[in-house]
Amino acid sequence: MSYFAKYFHFLVLLTLTALFLCPTEANARRKERSARGIMSSEIIEPDALAAKAAQEPRMKKATAMTTKQSNINSRYREGIDVSHYQGWIDWDQVAGSSRISYVYLKATEGANFLDDTYARNLSEARRVGLSVGSYHFYRPNVSWQEQLRNLTENVKAETQDLVPIIDIESRGKVSEEKFIADLKAFVLQVERHYGKKPLLYSYQNFYNRHLVGHFNDYHWMIAKYQESCPVLNDGKDYIMWQYTSTGSIPGIKGNVDRSKIMGDHTLHQVKL
């Protein structure tokens, strides 16, 4: 065999050996694509389907939340407010055996407190057809900006039937001027956030001592636990009277605050 023949034979053997032992770059890419195809059918596709399935309820929920209509139950003129102090509540019994139409639930207090019964009470009270609102207990010694964050992060407008209540029962250790200025700033920002004026709550003596002449354009719920209805020194007309803190309601163990709508007022006036 000549030198050139031997050299050609050597090149052929070398090429065949390389093809046998190592795939070409094209073959390698085809195998990589094939492997990706297998992975796609076994891993990526089920993940995508799961993500789609998980996304659909979220989209429906978001749509339902944005188109939610407030439920204004006008069958009765009485209501209650509850918090963790009432413990576990049988809401079916409350709605079935009580002559009440609305309930206010304690949601937040100060800068950080969230009532641990709030989520369940909110869901259950709305499920049984009561008109539901939430309240924030205002702390004068705490930054009103932090209180606003606490309230708005936990009380979502789309989950409410009624405007929120601001519970005002203490001046704290701040001056009268600072108390009123901070409270007004807080109430105004709550109004801007929810798009409607909140309902303000206090008891007769505190209102007459600290709040006369302020918040004239807001609805009030006034507490007075006596037979005679509250009398406000500025003649302010209030929409609700909380007339007892020792009420009894089927489905609730122990005492509960009860209130009623006054005069010609209706629950529609505090619809969110």
Image (spheres, rainbow, N blue to C red):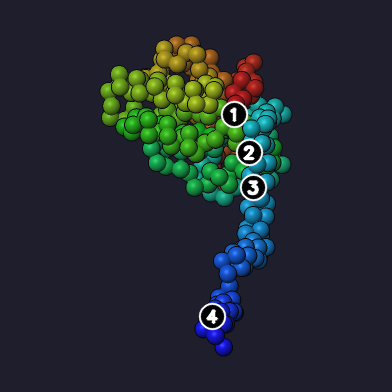
Secondary structure at badge 3 equals: helix
Q: Which mark is residue 4?
A: 4
Label 1's element? loop
Q: Residues within 10 Å of mark 4 (few under 14, many from 20)?
A: few
Q: Secondary structure at mark 4?
A: helix
Kind of residue indicated by mark 2: Ala
- Residue 55: give its label: 3
Distance Cα–Cα, label 4 vs label 2 = 79 Å
Instruction: Work out whether mark 1 precedes mark 3 in sequence or the reverse, and give the earlier one.
Output: 3
Residue type of the residue flagged with mark 1: Leu
State left or right for residue 240 relative to residue 98. Answer: left
Q: Which sits earlier in the primary sequence, circle 2 or circle 1?
A: 2
Secondary structure beneath dot 2 equals: helix
Q: CA distance from mark 2 to mark 1?
A: 20 Å
Q: Residues within 10 Å of mark 2 (few under 14, many from 20)?
A: few
Q: Looking at the rendering, in which quadrant would you find the C terminus?
A: top right
Which percent across, then down, holds residue 61? 65, 41
Q: Position of residue 85 (x, y in %)?
A: 49, 45
According to the image, label 1 marks what residue?
162
Task: Determine which residue is flagged by label 2.
Answer: 62
* Residue displayed at 57% across by 32% down: 157
* Residue 210 appears anywhere in the view: yes
On screen, 210 above or below 94?
above
Tell whether label 1 touches label 2 (CB within 8 Å): no
Which residue does the image show at 34% across and 20% down from the upper left? 181
